[in-house]
Amino acid sequence: MQTNSTTEKPLVATEYNGKDRNAFLFGWNPQAELWNGRLAMIGFLAYLVWDLAGYSVVRDILHLVG
């Protein structure tokens, strides 16, 4: 395993299965949970920006119901 000479830490952060944690692997593995969280954060941010722009699904639904 290669290490950084100044910190003595590995260059690639490995997870339980010994593969790169940032690798996009298909199936049930530790990397899937990382990518799921990252994509969820992007989705929440996109909806927040969309809501601040004046388009709100929740507000529209409440307006139709009430």
Image (spheres, grey):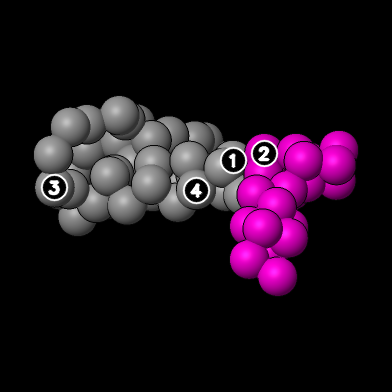
Return the x and y of residue 43 as percentages of the image width and height.
Answer: 57, 42
Question: Upstream in the sequence, badge 4 or badge 2?
Answer: 4
Residue located farthest toward the right when viewing the structure as drawn: 53
Instruction: Name which residue type carries label 3.
Output: Trp
Q: CA distance from mark 1 to mark 3?
A: 21 Å
User: From the image, which quarter does the C terminus lie in?
Assistant: bottom right
What segment carries the magenta color?
A: 45-66
Instruction: Name which residue type carries label 2.
Output: Ala
Disc number lying in front (2 or 3): 2
Q: Residue at x 39, y 42 (%)?
A: 35
Question: Upstream in the sequence, badge 2 or badge 3?
Answer: 3
Q: Which residue is mark 1?
A: 42
Q: Which residue is mark 3?
A: 28
Disc number lying in front (3 or 4): 4
> Magenta stretch: dominant SS?
helix
Question: Upstream in the sequence, badge 1 or badge 3?
Answer: 3
Q: Which residue is mark 4?
A: 40
Left or right: 66 in relation to 7: right
Q: Residue at x 13, y 39 (%)?
A: 27
User: From the image, which quarter does the N terminus lie in?
Assistant: top left
Evaluate if marks 1 and 3 touch, with contact meaning CB atoms under 8 Å apart. Answer: no
Residue 62 appearing in the image: yes
Left or right: 50 in relation to 64: right
Q: Residue at x 59, y 40 (%)?
A: 42
Residue 8 appearing in the image: no
Left or right: 13 in relation to 61: left
Circle 2 packing at 10 Å, graded few (<14), some (14-19), many (20+), is few
Instruction: Name which residue type carries label 1.
Output: Ile
Q: Which residue is mark 2?
A: 46
Evaluate if marks 2 and 1 touch, with contact meaning CB atoms under 8 Å apart. Answer: yes
